[in-house]
Image (cartoon, grey):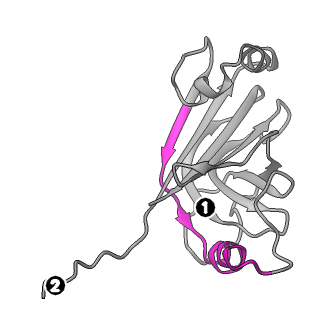
């Protein structure tokens, strides 16, 4: 009898992108023209707009144990990561990621709710979260980011310098893809 091939180990691929619009007008022009998605995904360039891409992250124990598995099992009383409850957070800490962390580590941090229509899911084994940070919000060096919910259950944390925000409108998009 042939030996069965063993395959075990799900993979998660994470991509985060930050589109940095120098002004509210530049952001609104991208939205009005219908090019925001293409700009974020670097399919088209927009004058004065920089896009930073970072791959990878670490899932946090609390996100797995108190978020993912209870939601998969249909547990009652669990806060979903839907449009009403999901948030993307940015902070200024460059402390290394650890699965035992339960929050962003920075002194300065801000969690923003989802843009309309996000998160998206249902194709390519992927969920995509997106939040827009306005001119007066999160004006510091973005060294870390996380997906959380209104119950403060963080799914993940990534340390990467995404740049220093000083005004302008920044759009953070993070996708998690399982395979």
Residue drawn at 43 percent across, 69 percent down: 10
Which quadrant of the structure image shows residue 61? bottom right
Quadrant where the C terminus sits is bottom left
Task: Tell me which segment is drawn in magenta.
Answer: 52-75
Q: Position of residue 63 (x, y in %)?
A: 66, 72
Quadrant where the N terminus sits is bottom left
Can residue 63 be found in the magenta stretch? Answer: yes
**Is 30 above or below relative to 137?**
above
Q: Which residue is mark 1?
A: 157
Residue drawn at 79 percent across, 62 percent down: 149
Q: Which residue is mark 2?
A: 3
Q: Position of residue 141 (x, y in %)?
A: 66, 42
**Is 131 above or below relative to 19?**
below
Which quadrant of the structure image shows residue 159? bottom right
**Is 97 above or below relative to 94?**
below
Can residue 106 be found in the magenta stretch? Answer: no
């Amino acid at each position: 009898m042939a030996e069965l091939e063993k395959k075990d180990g799900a993979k998660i691929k994470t991509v985060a992108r930050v589109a940095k619009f120098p002004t509210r007008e530049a952001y609104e022009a991208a939205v009005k023209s219908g090019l925001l998605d293409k700009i974020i995904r670097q399919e088209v360039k927009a004058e004065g707009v920089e896009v930073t891409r970072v791959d990878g992250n670490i899932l946090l124990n609390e996100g797995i144990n108190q978020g993912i598995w209870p939601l998969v099992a249909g547990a009652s009383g669990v806060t979903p990561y839907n449009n009403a409850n999901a948030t993307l957070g940015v902070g200024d800490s460059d402390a290394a990621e650890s699965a035992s962390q339960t929050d962003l580590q920075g002194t300065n941090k801000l969690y923003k709710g989802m843009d309309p229509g996000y998160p998206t899911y249902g194709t390519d084994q992927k969920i995509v979260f997106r939040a827009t940070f306005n001119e007066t919000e999160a004006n510091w060096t973005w060294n870390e980011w996380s997906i959380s919910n209104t119950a403060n259950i963080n799914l993940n944390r990534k340390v990467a310098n995404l740049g220093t925000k000083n005004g302008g409108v920044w759009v953070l998009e993070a996708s998690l893809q399982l395979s």
